[in-house]
Amino acid sequence: MKTRKIKIGNRVIGGGAPVLIQSMCNTKTDDIEGTIRQTLELERAGCDIIRVAVPDMSAAEALKEIKKNIHIPLVADIHFDYRLAIIAMENGADKIRLNPGNIGGKENIKKVVDVAKERKIPIRIGVNSGSLERDILRKYGGVTARGMVESAQKNIDLLQEFNFDDIVVSLKASNPKLNFESYRMMSAGSQFPLHVGVTEAGTVENGKIKSAVGIGALLLLGIGDTIRVSLTGDPLNEIKVAKSILEAAGLHLSPIEMISCPTCGRTGVDLSKIAEEIEKAMKEIAEKRSQKGMRPLKVAVMGCEVNGPGEAKDADLGVACGKGKGAIFINGKIVKTVDERQIKSTILDMVEHYEEYI
């Protein structure tokens, strides 16, 4: 189901717009210099939207200076105190994340909505499996997808009671299956943009797998307008994994996509070493191609004569290896055969100067 289009600062989500990557600073928000520095690092890595915690007035006031020094939409994460939401919006937040049901009575909700309407600031309702309302837990005997959706809808109703529709919804769980079921159920009955992620996914090693399963499965169904990979530690890792998930789902074109085979007993070269060295060296070339606006390339590094020739021919350029050597392809045609020791340098030269070879 196509979602509604909503503007967040200088970006648009929903309505068929590209899926955007969001992350969250792990600095203290009132450490203004540190928060700006980390946000700029995330921007350079490919972050589209940044969220910061706003636990108190000091953090809310800090947003004004932070907003002046960054270039992507700023989201304020609010809990319990409606006044923090109002101050955050007045100080430049482009979106706020809160659950209307936990900021007091309807008069408090109306105060927040009035400011959001005036400033055209969307609100994200963030349902989390770890903080579902007690009455919903009792009703469903624990955390369920239906309970997650009911919680989201209850909070949506609170905002719509004041004719507010600039709403984004998330229904995050640490269990990828529960996560999947919750988002799929919500998507079937709602046109609000969905922010997708697996909450508390864990450390980089385990968290990237859970996130790839939980987020990737939804993206392949066309569900998700923004994503966040929630990993313990440096948020730069979140951006790397998020970009990889979008690329694998066909939603983000990498400047250079490399495919390589898993190797087997037929492999006649040290393909693991060759592939790893090529992939590492191509990162700098990819950055240059991206900056120059050059078209993406697909590079195949294959280890044997079974799938190698076909995969290499399908790529813009590649190598299909035999015993101690590799046949180099460009646009489906063999252009030369080189010794194993020359494969890496040959492929890298052709990637860097691809347009000169065709």
Image (cartoon, rainbow, N blue to C red):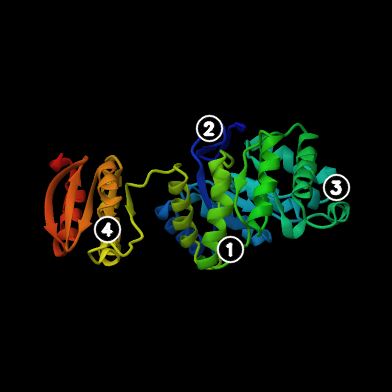
User: Which residue matches tag 2?
Assistant: 16
* Residue 69 visible in the shown view: no
- Who's the residue at 46% across and 42% down the image? 251
Cα–Cα span, label 4 and label 3: 65 Å
Whether residues under marks 2 and 4 lie with C-beta atoms below 8 angstroms apart, the answer is no
Tell me where residue 127 appears, x and y as whole percent: 71, 51
Cα–Cα span, label 2 and label 4: 39 Å
Instruction: Determine the secondary structure under disc 1.
Output: loop
User: Which residue matches tag 3?
Assistant: 105
Instruction: Determine the secondary structure under disc 3.
Output: loop
Whether residues under marks 1 and 2 lie with C-beta atoms below 8 angstroms apart, the answer is no
Q: Which of marks 4 and 1 is in front?
A: 4
Cα–Cα span, label 3 and label 2: 35 Å
Q: Earlier in the sequence, mark 1 or mark 3?
A: 1
User: Which residue matches tag 1?
Assistant: 30
Q: Nearer the viewer, mark 3 or mark 2?
A: 2
Instruction: Determine the secondary structure under disc 4.
Output: loop
User: Which residue matches tag 4?
Assistant: 303
Q: Which of marks 1 and 2 is nearer the N terminus?
A: 2
- Who's the residue at 73% across and 60% down the image? 130
Residue 160 placement, left or right of 41: right
Residue 253 placement, left or right of 112: left
Cα–Cα span, label 1 and label 3: 28 Å
Query: In this picture, is 113 found above or below 22?
Result: above
Q: Which of marks 4 and 1 is nearer the N terminus?
A: 1
Residue 42 lies in quadrant? bottom left
Callout 1, which amino acid? Asp
